[in-house]
Image (spheres, rainbow, N blue to C red):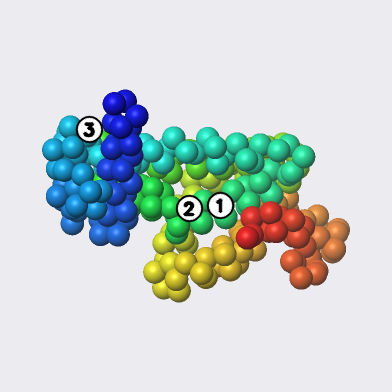
């Protein structure tokens, strides 16, 4: 019975996530979730008590998978900036392909109409960005003037805005290219400022304009 209950909860959660991602919180009803999952509305209320409860559960489920994703980028043989860039591609792919991630982001933007506290789905990404920037600065790969926490608070919203607008305007297939463009614009502002006496640093050359190829290849698919 316990396994059956877990399977029911999971099917309800996945159905709700798909609907929240497709049509938003306000336009989704308990009956919609029931119909999409193939379960009764009574089952929805038994497991989640309310539509607000299932919305919060969808966002929390995204948190549960975050450690698995972040753990893939704990390899200290790879520079922190390379890990940050690679992680950004995986998160971007999740935002376009994973219903839980899509629903979590959309529910956060619609949180004012949800009568329950909705966890911030971006908090862990901001924390990871802060940590990787701090590691990069300690290693001399980021300018000493960059404040990791402040930079992360600017980078994360810009990243999510890029993902949302790119998908809306060009479609999900354009996201990798736009994200690469964004990093080419962003990384120079993070790196140590060139010395006035070192013209080679002032004029990066090559197809990546001075970026190590692996910086981008680790995140591409």
Q: Label 1 belongs to which residue? A: 90
Dot 3: element: helix
Marking on residue 34: none
Q: Residue at x 45, y 74 (%)?
A: 170
Mark 3 surroundings within 10 Å by alpha-carbon count, few (fewer than 14), some (14 through 19), many (20 or more): some
Marks 1 and 3 in Cβ contact (< 8 Å): no
| 19 over 59 or under it: above or below | below
Taking depth in this image into account, of 134 and 56 the one nearest to the observer is 56
Marking on residue 47: 3
Marking on residue 94: 2
Count the marks: 3
Going from N to C along the chain, the mark reached first, 2 or 3, is: 3
Q: Does the rendering let one see residue 16? A: yes
Frontmost of labels 2 and 3 is 3
Q: Where in the figure is residue 122, as x and y percent of width and height? A: 43, 44
Gap in angstroms between the C-alphas marked 2 and 3: 26 Å
Q: Residue at x 63, y 52 (%)?
A: 85
Marks 2 and 1 in Cβ contact (< 8 Å): yes
């Amino acid at each position: 019975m316990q396994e059956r209950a877990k399977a029911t909860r999971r099917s309800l959660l996945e159905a709700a996530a798909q609907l929240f991602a497709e049509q938003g919180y306000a336009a989704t009803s308990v009956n919609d979730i029931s119909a999409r999952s193939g379960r009764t509305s009574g089952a929805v209320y038994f497991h989640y008590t309310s539509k607000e409860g299932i919305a919060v559960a969808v966002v929390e489920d995204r948190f549960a998978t975050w450690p698995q994703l972040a753990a893939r980028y704990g390899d200290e043989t790879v520079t922190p900036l390379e890990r940050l860039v690679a992680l950004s591609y995986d998160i971007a792919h999740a935002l376009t392909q994973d219903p839980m991630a899509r629903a979590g982001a959309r529910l956060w933007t619609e949180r004012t109409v949800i009568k329950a506290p909705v966890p911030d789905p971006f908090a862990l990404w901001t924390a990871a960005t802060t940590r990787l920037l701090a590691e990069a600065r300690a290693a001399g790969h980021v300018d000493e003037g960059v404040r990791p926490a402040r930079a992360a608070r600017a980078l994360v919203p810009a990243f999510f805005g890029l993902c949302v607008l790119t998908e809306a305007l060009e479609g999900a297939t354009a996201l990798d290219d736009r994200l690469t463009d964004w990093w080419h614009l962003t990384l120079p502002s993070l790196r140590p400022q060139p010395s006035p006496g070192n013209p080679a640093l002032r004029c990066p050359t090559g197809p990546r304009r001075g970026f190590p190829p692996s910086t981008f290849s680790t995140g591409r698919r």
